[in-house]
Amino acid sequence: MTLFNLVFWALGVVLIAVGYQRVRAPWSRYQALKEQDENIARYEAWRGGARDTSPTGASVAMMVLRRQAQRAGLLIVVGFVLVLLGFLIK
């Protein structure tokens, strides 16, 4: 075990932790907006009215939140790769 391995492990764990902290809030808000949108779609279908398919503020917010969650997820993946490299590099 070298200093190089320890640095990779530490950096990987830090990136995983930061990514997890950054993914929690946007993902939970995205899920709430998605659930609300599905509820509105069920109501409109039950009511028999045609649903407007133009972008709404909620759909734009969902797109932004999903992008934020994807970027944070990428940090988590990079962190896992660094931890794995810390084990593979001799």
Image (cartoon, rainbow, N blue to C red):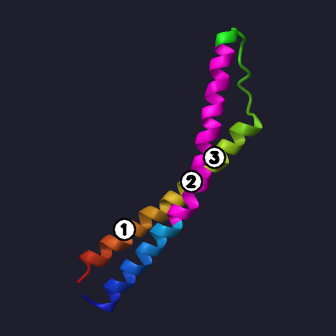
In-image side of 51 versus 71 (left or right): right
Amino acid type of the residue that numbered disc 2 sits on in the rendered structure: Ala
Amino acid type of the residue that numbered disc 3 sits on in the rendered structure: Arg
Residue 7 drawn at (x, y percent) = 39, 85
Q: Is residue 81 magenta?
A: no
- What residue is pinned by disc 2? 69
Specify the farthest residue to the top. 48
- What residue is pinned by disc 1? 81
Distance in Å between CA atoms under marks 3 and 1:
28 Å
Residue at image coords 75%, 34%: 56
Secondary structure mostly seen in magenta is helix
Marking on residue 29? 3
Helix, strand or loop for disc 2: helix
Residue at image coords 62%, 40%: 32
Residue 59 drawn at (x, y percent) = 69, 37
How many numbered discs? 3
Distance in Å between CA atoms under marks 3 and 2:
10 Å
Work out whether residue 66 can be spotted. no
Residue at image coords 41%, 80%: 10
Residue 16 location, quadrant: bottom left
Magenta-drawn segment? 19-45
Residue 53 location, quadrant: top right
Label 3 Cα crowd, 10 Å radius (few <14 / some 14-19 / many 20+): some
Residue 78 drawn at (x, y percent) = 43, 67
